[in-house]
Image (cartoon, rainbow, N blue to C red):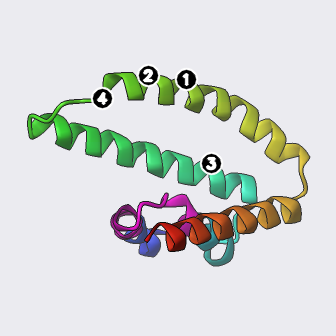
Amino acid sequence: MARLLWTAPLLSVMTGLVSMGAGDFLVPMLRTRLGMRMDAAIGNCLVLMAVNAVVVSGLLLLRGQEFPLGVVLWASAGVVIGGQIGPRLAARVPDQTLKEVFIYGLSLVGIHVLFKA
């Protein structure tokens, strides 16, 4: 796993450039390269994205930019609620179904990016 750690920051930068989440690329990589279950891959990806958010927030504050506290509070509520509901659903839904839902979601994001460009 240590030899793949460089991919998270690289994919974070790349996905930031196209306004997509890092999870769109990291979850399939964790599934195929490391053989993780879908719920474990999603959980690990959430931790990586949380670290990403903390680092970017710190950089914003260091540069003296305005910190959108209202957005953070609303997003935090969604993260807490989704963090409780998501793992429970992932444990009950078969791995193949989660994979298909993820693929459809990724396809919709791709279509959205194409039409937005």
Q: Main secondary structure of the magenta part?
A: helix
Q: Residues within 10 Å of mark 4 (few under 14, many from 20)?
A: few
Q: Which label's residue is closer to the chain start, 1 or 3?
A: 3
Could you tell me how many numbered marks the image carries? 4
Q: Position of residue 83 (x, y in %)?
A: 64, 34
Instruction: Describe the element under mark 2 as helix, strand or loop.
Output: helix
> Which residue bears the numbered disc 4?
68
Image side of residue 63 versus residue 106, left or right: left
Instruction: Describe the element under mark 3 as helix, strand or loop.
Output: helix
Q: Callout 1, which amino acid?
A: Ala
Q: Quadrant of residue 15?
A: bottom left
Magenta residues, start to end:
9-26
Q: Which label's residue is closer to the chain start, 2 or 4?
A: 4
> Which residue bears the numbered disc 2?
73
**Is residue 72 positioned above or below 93 on the image?**
above
> Which residue bears the numbered disc 3?
43
Q: Position of residue 53 (x, y in %)?
A: 37, 43
Q: Quadrant of residue 79?
A: top right
Q: CA distance from mark 4 to mark 3?
A: 26 Å
Instruction: Describe the element under mark 4 as helix, strand or loop.
Output: loop
User: Quick check: marks 3 and 2 in contact, CB under 8 Å?
Assistant: no
Q: CA distance from mark 2 to mark 4?
A: 9 Å
Q: Callout 4, which amino acid?
A: Pro
User: Quick check: marks 1 and 2 in contact, CB under 8 Å?
Assistant: yes
Is residue 49 or residue 69 the one in the foreground? 69
Looking at the rendered image, the quarter that the C terminus falls into is: bottom left
Q: Residues within 10 Å of mark 3 (few under 14, many from 20)?
A: some
Q: Which label's residue is closer to the chain start, 3 or 2?
A: 3
Q: Of circles 3 and 2, which is in front? A: 2
Image side of residue 49 versus residue 35, left or right: left
Q: Position of residue 105 (x, y in %)?
A: 69, 61
Q: Position of residue 3 (x, y in %)?
A: 43, 75
